[in-house]
Amino acid sequence: MAKYVYNDYRNVEIRKLNADVLCDLIDILEVDNDWKRLMSLVPKNIESLHFEPKYNSEHIRLIEDHAKSTNQKCTEIMFDEWGTSGRVRPTLNTLKRIVIQAQMFRAADEIARLLKEPYPMRPEIGPAAPVTGLTMMLNDESSIRMDSRVCNDPTKEMKSASDMIKFSESMNIPNLSVLIGDDTSFNEVEDSQKYSSRGSNDQYNGFQYQTSFPNINISGEIDSVILKDVNLKHFQYDDLRQITNNFCETPTNVPHLTGKIGSGGFGEVYVGKHLQYGLLAIKKIKNNLPMNTKSDIAMTLFNTEVRCLSQFKHKNIVPIFGFSIDGPAPCVVCEYIDGGSLHYNIAAKILNKEQRFSIIAGTAEGLKYLHAEHIIEDNSSNSENLPKSVKNFVHGDIKSANILLTRDCVPKLCDFGLSKQHDATTFITTPQGTESYMAHEMLHGTITQKGDIYSFGIVLLELLTGFEPIVKRDGVRYNIKDYVEENVTNNDISMLVDPVVGEWPKAKEIYELCQMCLQYDRKSRPTINEVCDTLDAMQ
């Protein structure tokens, strides 16, 4: 087991800090809603010299609403969301830098005390100036609390990994990481190397990562329908670990692509070459979801994705081979799609107008299949005479990052962890999905197939314009729908069409379809059958 000394402690991720330490910081930051000021100063990229805010007022409102409904402290929720999202996770040193920038010196003093560093210099005048007597008294009081948790001799061992708990284990918060669209697909080796900061042994700066699901029997939580499905292969976790180079965070391309290729809200995606099945895409479900019952939720997402993919057989849906449940984390094993995500291909400026239209049509066909009625079969060996149920589905997270392309630009929908069986309207208390693609009713928990139609409309705008779903201009962030509407004159989209496409005769018709999909009133949006009919007419 790794040992911990103070020199390492500054680089501990916030999500791995001792809970007592965070509780003291939470109490300090709850005063006068200082957590809001802190949250507004959290950068989207903590490594960038150029500041861009990670959160906005809508995210603050979501935290306040959830805090009221769960009797939690807002700072508690904010720490857990921030600490478990992003490519590079914030450390105690990151937090210290931001609270000093915000002149939150009580919190800065608390962090400095933990690090056994001098207190940061305060200004001599103004609200942040020390108050004679009071500041010293507060610091002495905090020191007494700290002495009960942290040994004064820096040469003595700190708590072991088993004692260093993840703060999110005591939480129950909305999945803001998904709402703010922080999941990023790495489809090129170079991108993954740029953002990868950890080795393959689940260690970082001397601290051991917890890679198992605490207090839960993974194999006991698997849906029995999955276990009985004769079409799904049970992969050994050790075999998957071997072919992914121990789930290496840094991918390599010699002699073939191996290692991590993507990261999303619910899982890390790796690639490895199997002797029988060839290149596999292996989604290892995260065990650090920012929720109190995260293991249960992770298993629910795993069960949903495997069940859906095992039932859905369509050329525009990613094929599944099987799963693994005998290791510290469950894995979904699918066919590796070698052309990268649509999001990557749009950003790379390599798609021509014919390819883009083909992607639009294929994605719509995949959604049409998903939205149609499905006979849900029991694929166990002795199920011939059992009744079969009929269901139709909502994907719940349609976005360009969840549309994978073959080298021939055939689109395939993936990431079905948020999919739901759907009869008419489903309501959930915690919004799930990616905010920049979500219709207003989805943000409030109303889930219908028309929500998928809205998200598809955002994807159409990406393909038309080449813009990101959040457009940044002159320091202002716009949703792509709002930006296009504000900059289109007389409904003419031609001036905003991605320049790499050139003149695109179908652009006007596609934009008209896009406007139909993005109607505020969901009842005014077309069905996916109507979308496909419109596209067929264009061809």
Image (cartoon, rainbow, N blue to C red):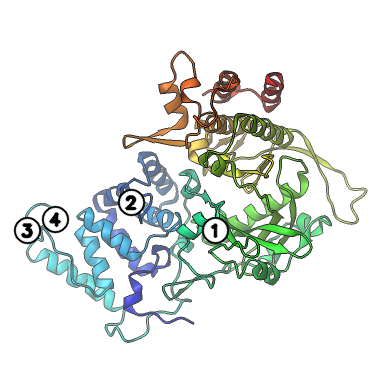
In terms of sequence position, does the residue under pointer 1 or pointer 4 come before the other?
Answer: 4
**Residue on which disc 3 sits:** 124
- Crowd rating for badge 4 (residues with CA inside 10 Å; few <14, some 14–19, many 20+): some
Q: Secondary structure at mark 3?
A: loop
In terms of sequence position, does the residue under pointer 3 or pointer 1 come before the other?
Answer: 3
In terms of sequence position, does the residue under pointer 2 or pointer 1 come before the other?
Answer: 2
Residue 42: image tag: 2
Residue 362 falls in which quadrant of the image?
A: top right
In terms of sequence position, does the residue under pointer 4 or pointer 2 come before the other?
Answer: 2
Distance from disc 4 to disc 2, alpha carbons, whole Å, reads: 20 Å
Q: Which residue appears at 29% of the width and 49% of the height?
A: 41
Judged left or right of residue 357, residue 520 is left
- Crowd rating for badge 3 (residues with CA inside 10 Å; few <14, some 14–19, many 20+): few
Amino acid at circle 1? Thr
Q: Which residue appears at 79% of the width and 57% of the height?
A: 232
Amino acid at circle 4? Ala
**Residue on which disc 4 sits:** 128
